[in-house]
Structure formats: structure tokens, C-alpha cells
Image (cartoon, rainbow, N blue to C red):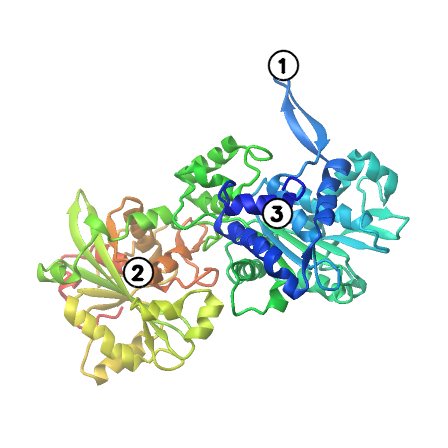
């Protein structure tokens, strides 16, 4: 096994002698299975070629390491680039596996690994190997990105390796000085340089190797498609992608991530011809692991832990994320390979999960209604493709002007477009409908006649006193209800933006410093009250994965005075449930005058 470091790693991972995440374990099982069954498809693993590529790193390349002397002064020095076992698996797989024609099997590679694990130096080393050590004439090697600044980051690693390596200095030439803009291999007519998608005349490029960094930052697939178009006639070409995890489930990175999981786990819907040329190494935690609480799982997503990235650094990141919720999403993505729902976590996952109505926080809406506990609603009607969400919130008790709440949300969605939207939104809508967490309404859009039956039925059962509503579609819904002899109790238009509305006519409204009236019902106030209840765990949320998905996708828009509203346009998922929840909290906590509208029945539209 010591003579085959690629397979040695796979065996150790599958045997749990090396700790790795679920997708890396799957990739290792795939390698071992192909060693056994691959010959039937014309594939073979060339150990000598794999070891040649692995040895190239240690004998030709160096990396820079930082050390502290006895005097405490930090210095850096170059040391041979000895690949770690996980890197041997990647490099050995790429250059050891051959197809039936004797060419390299893998033409695409996707690697998703924690920040600081040495992805970029490894990619730069692969670029050097493809540039001048594969006996290929006129090899074109590119460090690629959407813009030249990003493309130059990985290329600078390659230049630094060239500057430190006598073997590369002897073999390679260069163009440009401070900075070097291209490395050349005169003997074979090959070159290595950065390239971006905005390059003019890019249709003429024919990459032998394309190194694409930080796929999660790419706004589209223009870079990948530009490079793929140039590799069609080259049976030895390799596109090598490296990245951290992201948050946008409509991005090219998410598409590559999901496809990679299907490949390593052997999705039967994919043909062998498709998957045999795709290599994937995707770091991830196992289900249920919480890296903010358990350090033992860190190695699964940081395979270079203790080498190029230190535990103390990650501890610092975790401590800051716990103290600054806005940083949580970034730390989970970069350091723990967790795909988040938004770029910055408006509602941290641990805060939301702490408010789930399980155990001693569970509640019975029927029992609360029997005890005449006050109940208030929020209704967010859908447009063509959104969810319709209806939330009821019960005000349980008030201690020192701090209300405790219990909340439950119902969802409706168009049935005819369910599968299409599930793919677009990257959400298991069909499963949620089947499990009863939301209702699929026949047709391509929600019918008001359907809601005119469903919502009054819920209201009759739980008797909400006021329902805050988005203006959109409310008049049509009230008309549909009137035709059926139903009504929406205490329907109040709840502004969705930064505008404010009074609740009833009041003459005692105070004025703020600007002289404007102090109006009492508006979204920033409702958001603040909801957020405070979540952070202080004063609200029990009925368990519903649709609602959890809505909470994870929240992104705020902030005005110049620091007030916040929900930004549906920038949200990474449907957030309709959070809108209805905030409105229900808002109408429940407004302070009415002595003519209480809480006792009002029927429609009260402001």
C-alpha cells in the first residue's frame, strides 16, 4: 500500500482509520469499487503514473511555512511540497486512472474543502505538472476566473513555486516582470497564465488544463463553459475546480456540488458515460454534527488541520461567530463546508432551532383556544409562484412587559408547477406536501376561492382577533369570502416596507424628533419584536420544515436610519412564512387606544 498512496488513503478512510466526511467516504468507496469492477468498462488504475505525479510535488515544488525561532520572531522558509494523504488521493486519482483508450479518465474535477487547507497551492502544482511534465506539446494551462484579479490569485502561487524551485527555473521561462504575467516552457511550446471570462478573442483558447478557483463566487457558468468549449478536441484535457461552500442554491457552484454528490454516491439516474469522467472530493460533516460545539468533527472538513490551518485559528472564528451572529454564515461556509441559506445569517440556525415547539415547549392550539388565550394572525398572499402563508400567534403571558408567544403557520402552493419550482428553488416541495406540512392547490396559481374556504375554516377553529395582511390580493380574497358568506376577522393592512400605518383613529399620537407622527404598525417594528422574541426564546414555533426553510432564507434590507424590512428579491429561498409570522407578532403587540380594536370582528382595512 505504501507504493500506492491513492488506494492506501481510500482503504484507510473506508475502514474509518482516517476520519472523513460522508461524501469523501463515498468517493473512496467508488475508487475501491472501480479497482474491482472498472476493467469491465475498460478502465485501469496506473499506480506508476499516480505515484509519478505525487512525487513531482515533493521533488520539484516547495511551499512556504512560517516558524517561530527561539527569540519568538516569526520567519518563513521553503520546504518540499510533500502531499498529505488526502492530497495524494486527489492527485493520484486524477493522473492514475486511465480509460479504455489509455487516456486519463477524469476530465472534470470538483473539490470543495475548508478554507486554509491548501487547495490553491495543490491546484497550482497540478498546473505546473500539466504545463511541462506530461510530455504534451503546446499545452495551454490557465488559472481562470470571472475577472483577472481573481484569476491572478492562484497564478501568483504558481509563480512563487517557480521562483523557489531550481528545477522549474531551469525548465521554464517567463513573460513580464513584477508581476510575471505568463510562464513558458520553450521546449514544448507550452504556457501557463491567468485568464478571465471577459478576455477578448477567448474562442481561440484550447486548454490542456484549466484551474478554476472559488467557484462559489462565480455569478454564472460563463468561465466553465468558455473553457469546456476549448477542450472538446483534447482527450487529455482537465478542468479542475476548487472552492469553499456557498449559499446561493441557484448558482453554478451549487449545481456542481449537487452533481458531484450524485456521482460519488452512485445516483442511478446518471449514466456511466456521464460519471466516469467526473472526479469529486467534497468535504462535509455528517448529519447532526454541530461544529460550534464539537471540535472532533473539524478534521472532516479541514483535512489539513494542524498543518496549514491550526485549531486555535478555527476556535477564534467560532468564538467570533457566536458573539456576532452576522458572521455565523461565513464561518459555517468557509471553515465547516456548510451551505447556508443566505450570505449573512439574519436568523442564526441555533437561535431558530432553540425556539422549536418540542418537549416542554410543545403546545396545543386547541387547548389554547379553549382557554381563550388571545390569538392574532398574519397573512401573506402569494403572487403567481410564491407560497401563501397564514400564521396564528397566541399571546401566552406577559411578564414585565415581555410577552411569550406560541406560533403555527399553514402553507399553500400551486400544484401544477410544484415539481418545476422544487427544482428552481432547490426545495423538497413534493415531500413537504406528502408529509402534510403544506397543501398543494390544483392549478398553476393559488385560487382565492380555495383560500376563501380554507382560511375561514382555520379562523373559526382558533378565533383570531386581528389578522395583519399584505395589501396584495387582499381585496380579491375578501370579495371571494363575501361571495361565500365568510369573512376575515379583523383584517388589517400591515405595511411591508418602511411606511407606517395607524391602527384606528388616535389623537394622542406622539411626534418623534422630526415632527412626524408616531405611527404604530409597520414592518421594521414587527421584525424587531419577532427577533427579540426569538433571541430571548420567548416564542415556541410549531415544527414545520417549510417554516425552517423560510427562516434560513431571510435577508434584510436596511434604510439610512437603520430600520429593516424583509428583502424578498434577494432572499435565497421563499420567506413568506417569516413575513406572515412577523405580521402576526406586529398586530399582536401594537398598543391600541382605549377603544380596543382587539374586540372588533369583521373586516377592518386601514
Q: Earlier in the sequence, mark 3 or mark 1?
A: 3
Quarter holding the C terminus? Answer: bottom left
Earlier along the polypeptide chain: callout 2 or callout 3? 3
- Looking at the image, is mark 3 or mark 1 nearer the viewer? 3
Alpha carbon separation for disc pair 2 and 3 = 44 Å
Q: CA distance from mark 1 to mark 2?
A: 58 Å
- Compared with residue 23, is residue 76 higher up or lower down, i.e. above or below? above
Residue 242 drawn at (x, y percent)? 62, 51
Residue 71 tag number: 1
**Regarding mark 1 in the picture, which secondary structure is present there?**
loop
* Residue 446 on image: x %, y %: 35, 78
Instruction: Find disc 3 in the rendering and name its residue.
Output: 7
Q: Which residue is mark 2?
A: 544
511 lies left or right of 43: left
- Dot 2 crowding, Cα within 10 Å, few <14, some 14–19, many 20+: some
Residue drawn at 90 percent across, 49 percent down:
187
Amino acid at each position: 500500500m505504501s507504493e500506492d498512496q491513492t488506494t492506501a488513503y481510500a482503504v484507510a478512510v473506508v475502514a474509518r482509520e482516517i476520519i472523513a466526511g460522508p461524501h469523501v467516504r463515498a468517493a473512496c468507496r467508488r475508487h475501491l469499487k472501480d479497482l474491482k469492477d472498472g476493467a469491465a468498462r475498460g478502465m485501469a488504475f496506473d499506480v506508476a503514473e499516480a505515484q509519478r505525479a505525487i512525487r513531482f510535488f515533493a521533488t520539484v515544488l516547495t511551499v512556504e511555512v512560517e516558524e517561530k525561532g527561539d527569540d519568538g520572531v516569526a520567519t518563513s522558509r521553503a520546504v518540499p511540497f510533500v502531499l498529505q494523504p488526502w492530497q495524494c488521493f486527489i492527485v493520484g486519482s486524477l493522473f492514475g486512472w486511465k480509460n479504455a483508450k489509455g487516456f486519463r479518465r477524469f476530465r472534470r474535477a470538483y473539490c470543495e474543502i475548508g478554507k486554509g487547507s491548501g487547495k490553491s497551492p495543490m491546484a497550482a502544482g497540478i498546473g505546473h505538472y500539466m504545463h511541462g511534465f506530461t510530455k504534451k506539446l503546446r499545452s495551454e494551462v490557465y488559472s481562470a476566473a470571472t475577472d483577472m484579479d481573481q484569476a491572478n490569485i492562484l497564478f501568483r502561487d504558481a509563480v512563487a513555486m517557480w521562483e523557489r524551485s531550481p528545477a522549474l527555473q531551469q525548465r521554464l521561462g517567463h513573460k513580464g516582470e513584477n508581476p510575471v504575467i505568463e510562464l513558458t516552457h520553450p521546449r514544448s511550446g507550452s504556457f501557463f497564465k491567468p485568464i478571465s471570462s471577459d478576455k477578448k478573442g477567448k474562442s481561440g483558447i484550447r486548454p490542456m488544463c484549466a484551474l478554476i478557483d472559488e467557484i462559489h463566487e462565480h455569478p454564472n457558468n460563463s468561465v466553465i463553459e468558455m473553457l469546456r468549449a476549448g477542450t472538446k478536441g483534447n482527450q487529455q484535457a482537465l478542468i479542475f475546480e476548487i472552492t469553499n461552500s456557498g449559499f446561493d442554491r441557484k448558482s453554478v457552484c451549487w449545481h456542481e456540488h449537487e452533481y458531484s454528490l450524485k456521482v460519488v454516491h452512485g445516483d442511478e439516474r446518471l449514466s456511466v458515460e456521464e460519471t466516469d469522467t467526473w472526479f469529486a472530493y467534497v468535504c462535509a460533516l455528517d448529519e447532526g454534527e454541530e461544529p460550534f460545539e464539537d471540535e472532533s468533527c473539524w478534521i472532516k472538513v479541514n483535512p489539513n488541520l494542524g498543518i496549514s490551518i491550526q485549531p486555535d485559528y478555527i476556535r477564534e472564528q467560532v468564538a467570533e461567530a457566536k458573539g456576532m451572529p452576522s458572521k455565523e454564515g461565513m464561518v459555517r461556509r468557509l471553515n465547516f463546508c456548510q451551505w447556508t441559506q443566505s450570505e449573512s445569517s439574519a436568523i442564526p440556525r441555533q437561535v431558530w432551532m432553540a425556539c422549536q415547539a418540542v418537549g416542554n415547549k410543545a403546545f396545543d392550539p386547541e387547548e389554547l383556544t379553549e382557554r381563550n388565550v388571545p390569538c392574532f394572525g398574519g397573512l401573506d398572499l402569494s403572487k403567481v409562484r410564491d407560497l401563501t402563508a397564514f400564521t396564528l400567534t397566541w399571546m401566552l403571558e406577559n411578564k414585565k412587559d415581555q410577552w411569550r408567544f406560541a406560533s403555527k403557520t399553514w402553507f399553500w402552493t400551486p400544484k401544477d408547477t410544484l415539481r418545476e419550482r422544487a427544482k428552481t428553488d432547490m426545495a423538497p416541495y413534493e415531500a413537504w406536501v406528502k408529509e402534510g406540512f403544506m397543501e398543494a392547490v390544483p392549478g398553476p396559481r393559488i385560487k382565492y376561492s380555495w383560500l376563501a374556504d380554507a382560511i375561514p375554516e382555520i379562523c373559526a377553529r382558533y378565533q383570531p382577533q386581528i389578522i395583519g395582511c399584505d395589501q396584495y390580493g387582499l381585496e380579491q380574497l375578501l370579495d371571494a369570502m363575501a361571495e361565500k358568506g365568510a369573512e376575515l376577522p379583523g383584517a388589517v393592512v400591515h405595511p411591508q416596507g418602511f411606511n407606517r400605518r395607524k391602527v384606528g383613529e388616535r389623537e394622542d399620537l406622539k411626534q418623534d424628533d422630526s415632527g412626524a407622527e408616531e405611527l404604530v404598525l409597520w414592518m421594521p417594528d414587527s421584525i424587531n419584536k419577532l427577533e427579540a422574541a426569538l433571541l430571548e426564546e420567548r416564542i415556541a414555533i410549531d415544527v414545520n420544515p417549510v417554516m425552517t426553510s423560510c427562516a434560513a432564507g431571510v435577508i434584510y434590507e436596511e434604510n439610512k436610519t437603520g430600520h429593516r424590512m424583509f428583502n424578498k428579491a434577494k432572499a435565497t429561498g421563499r420567506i413568506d412564512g417569516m413575513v406572515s409570522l412577523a405580521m402576526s407578532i406586529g398586530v399582536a403587540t401594537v398598543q391600541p387606544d382605549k377603544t380596543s380594536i382587539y374586540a372588533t370582528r369583521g373586516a377592518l382595512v386601514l
